[in-house]
Amino acid sequence: MRLSSLTIWYNPSLKEVKNILSYSDNFDKVYIVDNSDLDNSELAKKINNAVYVPLMKNTGIAYALNRGFERAISDGFDWVMTMDQDSVWEEEEIKKYLQWVEQITIENNNIVSLAPFAKVQNKSWAGVLLWPLVFKLTKRKGIDFVDRCFCSANIVSVKIWQKVGGFNEKLFIDDVDYDFCYKIRRQGYLIVLNNDIWFNHAIGGEKLTILPRINNHSDFRLYYIMRNMMYIMKVYPEFAKKFHYRKDLFLLIADTCLFNKEHRKILARAKHDLKTLL
């Protein structure tokens, strides 16, 4: 299999370069599609096998991913590993992951999307202290066939990306990865998760707090979360039911809109704009 990696940048720093360097040596080419307003080509040059694609504005995660897949296809790659800029691999884990991927895709050609376990960095002291216990109680072992996975560290067949029409650019951000997974599953293809292989993933742009916060989103982000959750409920009702979208949307509205007039306006705009997606 010919495999490349693809990372989407947004206002990167040397930290994001270091993150890519944790796995870049395992690939012939590392595509970096940059949603920043500024050119970050000098940063990209610190990664020997990087192919830098500046978009010079925030086009959304879906648009950037699609441009990256197009470049990978033009260079003859048939699989792409998509990575968030905040994700990091341990050397031993990435090597195990790539060996497993090559083996299992030979054994089952109906598997078109593969993922490892994501160790998500906690953003509260309470979460940090409780993480070892939570991890022990909830960590699964072995391989699971799943209906969705994170975009980060997901290895995807470019043939399937073409067949399902790529990532939905109308969603812009939020649920872009899950929407893509739901399209795959509806067509009967398989997504497999290996719980015994892991990578580190952090949510960018947040500070460590004492207790977890239900909502810490900007108004810009809150709009897309609400609108896209409603979109999933309309387009993929079977998956929305399985993953409790209605309950999660209700809790989000209760947390953000009950005592905030401006957030109620955001919800109203999200409901109105939903029509343009359907």
Image: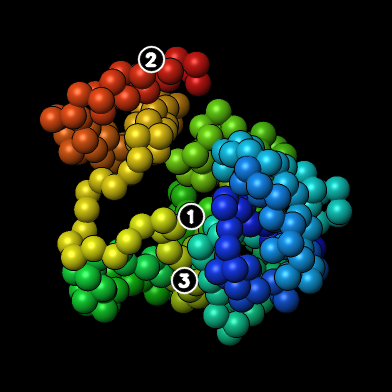
In the displayed orientation, state which residue is furthest to the left.
259
Badge number at residue 42: none
Q: Is residue 153 above or below residue 277?
A: below
- Contact, CB < 8 Å: mark 3 with mark 1? no
Which of 120 and 223 lies nearest the eye of the viewer?
Answer: 223
Identify the residue at image location x=59%, y=68%.
Answer: 14
Identify the residue at image location x=86%, y=53%.
Answer: 75
Can residue 206 be seen here?
A: yes
List the residue tagged with mark 3.
200
Among numbered discs 2 and 3, the one appearing first in the sequence: 3
Residue 131: x and y, percent?
A: 26, 73
Among numbered discs 3 and 1, the one appearing first in the sequence: 1
Q: CA distance from mark 2 to mark 3?
A: 37 Å
How many labels sit on residues? 3
Identify the residue at image location x=64%, y=79%.
Answer: 95
Residue 144: x and y, percent?
A: 45, 63
Disc 1 residue type?
Answer: Phe
List the residue tagged with mark 1.
150
Which of 11 and 250 lies nearest the eye of the viewer?
Answer: 11
In the displayed orientation, state which residue is furthest to the right.
75
Among numbered discs 1 and 2, the one appearing first in the sequence: 1
| Quadrant in the picture for residue 268 | top left
Q: CA distance from mark 3 to mark 1?
A: 12 Å
Q: Is residue 90 above or below residue 165?
A: below
Disc 2 residue type?
Answer: His
List the residue tagged with mark 2.
272
Q: Nearer the viewer, mark 3 or mark 1?
A: 3
Q: Secondary structure at mark 2?
A: helix
Task: Specify the quadrant that holds the N terminus.
Answer: bottom right
Q: Is residue 267 above or below residue 40?
A: above
Disc 3 residue type?
Answer: Asn
